[in-house]
Amino acid sequence: MPSGLERDGLDLLASSVPLKDIRYVLYEGDYSAIWNLKRVAEDADSLWTIQVVSSSVHRFWLFDMGSGFSVHDDQLQKVAESTIILRNLHPTPPPHLRRPWNAFIDAVRASIIRSANQCSIAHTSRWAVALKNGFILANNLHADEWLTSGWEHVRSLLYVHLQIHPVLNTEQQQLIVHPTITQTPYHLLAIPPLQVPP
């Protein structure tokens, strides 16, 4: 997770993240150039988000939260480079800052979702998979759990919707991460499949 958003796993949920002025760069390119940049940005642990403009044009927003990550690629066009001054966002963002500010909020949410997914990979007892503006959270079932409980006792999947609320005033500048957890009507299938006797 990028510098400035350091938390372990799901501990970032229901917490606040302090903010400072945010430098950003916006790139445009085709699918292959943008997704190559995505792989580099993931390795550099940067804060980023991708927007699809058309089938041939993708936008890559890169936000500097202290990592100092930069890009040099002939297939990418640098469209904009600036800094979001947080005091200029209060009480509402001016028109020229709305698009980069919304992209920053999307990038923070995406970073949290990626972190939850990576944390779940390390734990075989539960997993998290991105879905819309959140993720599906589940506990893996042991093979014998199907034998000792009926369908009505099986734990259903949970959907965690992430809301990111900015608090921008003269006293504090931070993001509040607010998860809304909803139980879904869906369940996991047994892994491995339940063996039916002959």
Image: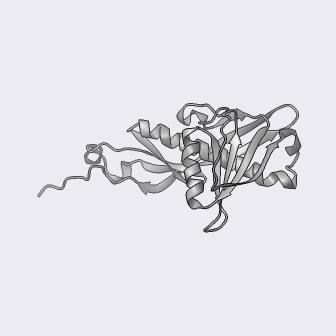
Going by the picture, which residue comes out furthest to the front? 74
**Colouring of the image:** one colour
- Camera-nearest residue between 39 and 12: 39
Please tell me which residue is depicted at 30% across the width and 49% down the height of the picture: 191
Q: Nearer the viewer, residue 52 or 116?
A: 52
**Coordinates of residue 136 in the picture (x, y in percent):** 50, 50
Give the position of the N terminus as an image quadrant. Answer: top right
Question: Residue at the spot x=52%, y=51% of the render?
Answer: 130
Is any part of residue 169 visible from this angle? Answer: yes
Residue 56 sits in quarter: bottom right
State the residue lying farthest toward the left.
198
65 with respect to 113 (left or right): right
Q: Quadrant of the C terminus?
A: bottom left
User: Where residue 162 sits in the image (x, y, percent)?
Assistant: 62, 47
Q: Residue at x 61, y 61 (%)?
A: 30
Measuring from the top left, give residue 71's x and y in whole percent: 65, 44
Q: Left or right: where does residue 176 sit relative to residue 145?
A: right
Count of labels in the image = 0
- Work out whether residue 7 or residue 38 is closer to the camera in this orientation and state it: 38
Residue 90 visible? The answer is: no
The reply, left or right, for residue 72 in relation to residue 188 is right
Residue 122 image offset from top left, x and y in percent: 42, 36
